[in-house]
């Protein structure tokens, strides 16, 4: 079974990004992002319409990190390391199955620039090489074509499709499950 320890926090870098620890100081920009109906359109979570709700969400992620149950990075541009522009992380970690779910979001003004692909590539490498995951899954609303595209670009393959398996803002929605296997896994 997997044994995880996220202390000290693993700061990651890409060509253009810094993936650092999320803090309560990021809550105002988290609130802006998580209250944006376009950003949250396909995410089955309530909008963070107040700063207090955003702070609760950040505290939930910090608690998950403290308990070694999940890890979320704050996405920043390297030239602005204090400015939160998104998040990416692993949650719903199945230690007994060496599997985790990846989740991510990015500020709309940065969409279409390849930044999320850059972040996903770096986080996947960390998950496979340091955390020893055997597989990583991404669960998305299939109407979220941009998310499907970035997963496919990162070599994820669709392995399941669930019809109307969750209730989202007044109607039932589908889920597509994509996964990526660690082909060099020595478990």
Image (cartoon, helix red, strand yellow):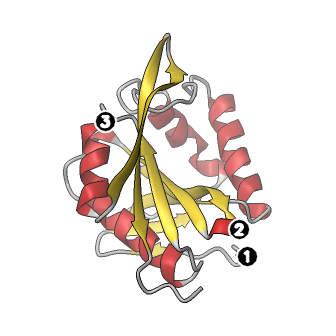
Percent position of residue 88, x then y = 48, 56
Q: Alpha carbon of mark 3 to alpha carbon of mark 2: how far?
A: 30 Å
Query: Which quadrant of the view contains residue 22?
Result: bottom right
Q: Which mark is residue 94?
A: none
Nearer the camera: disc 3 or disc 2: 2
Residue 2's place in the image compared with 154, above or below, is below
Q: Which mark is residue 96?
A: 2
Badge 1 crowding class, 10 Å Cα cut-off, few under 14, some 14 to 19, many 20 or more, is few
Q: Is residue 71 left or right of residue 82?
A: right
Query: Which quadrant of the view contains residue 45?
Result: top right
The structure residue drawn at horizontal position 44% and vertical position 52%, both measured from the top left corner, is: 138
Tag 2 or tag 1, which sits nearer the N-term?
A: 1
Tag 3 or tag 1, which sits nearer the N-term?
A: 1
Residue 175's place in the image compared with 66, above or below, is above
The structure residue drawn at horizontal position 26% and vertical position 57%, both measured from the top left corner, is: 152
Q: Secondary structure at mark 3?
A: loop
The structure residue drawn at horizontal position 40% and vertical position 65%, both measured from the top left corner, is: 180
Q: Secondary structure at mark 2?
A: helix
Query: For mark 1, what is the residue?
Result: 1
The answer to whether the residue labelled 1 contacts the one labelled 2, judged by CB atoms less than 8 Å apart, is yes
Percent position of residue 161, x then y = 40, 39
Q: Alpha carbon of mark 1 to alpha carbon of mark 2: how far?
A: 5 Å
Q: Secondary structure at mark 1?
A: loop
Query: Which one is nearer the viewer's eye here, 95 or 38?
Result: 95
Residue 127's place in the image compared with 39, above or below, is below
Badge 3 crowding class, 10 Å Cα cut-off, few under 14, some 14 to 19, many 20 or more, is few
Query: For mark 3, what is the residue?
Result: 144
Query: Which quadrant of the view contains residue 15?
Result: bottom left
């Amino acid at each position: 079974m997997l044994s995880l320890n996220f202390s000290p926090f693993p700061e990651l870098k890409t060509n253009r990004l810094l993936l650092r620890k999320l803090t309560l100081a990021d809550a105002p920009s988290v609130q802006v992002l998580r209250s944006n109906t376009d950003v949250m359109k396909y995410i089955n979570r309530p909008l963070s319409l107040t700063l207090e709700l955003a702070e609760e969400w950040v505290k939930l992620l910090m608690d998950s990190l403290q308990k070694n149950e999940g890890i979320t990075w704050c996405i920043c541009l390297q030239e602005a390391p204090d400015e939160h522009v998104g998040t990416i992380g692993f949650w719903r970690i199945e230690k007994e199955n060496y599997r985790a779910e990846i989740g991510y979001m990015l500020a709309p003004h940065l969409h279409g620039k390849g930044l999320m692909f850059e972040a996903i590539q770096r986080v996947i490498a960390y998950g496979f090489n340091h955390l020893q995951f055997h597989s990583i899954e991404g669960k998305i609303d299939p109407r979220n074509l941009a998310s499907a595209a970035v997963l496919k670009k990162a070599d994820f393959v669709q392995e399941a499709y669930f019809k109307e398996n969750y209730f989202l803002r007044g109607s039932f929605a589908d889920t597509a499950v994509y996964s990526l296997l660690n082909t060099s896994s020595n478990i």
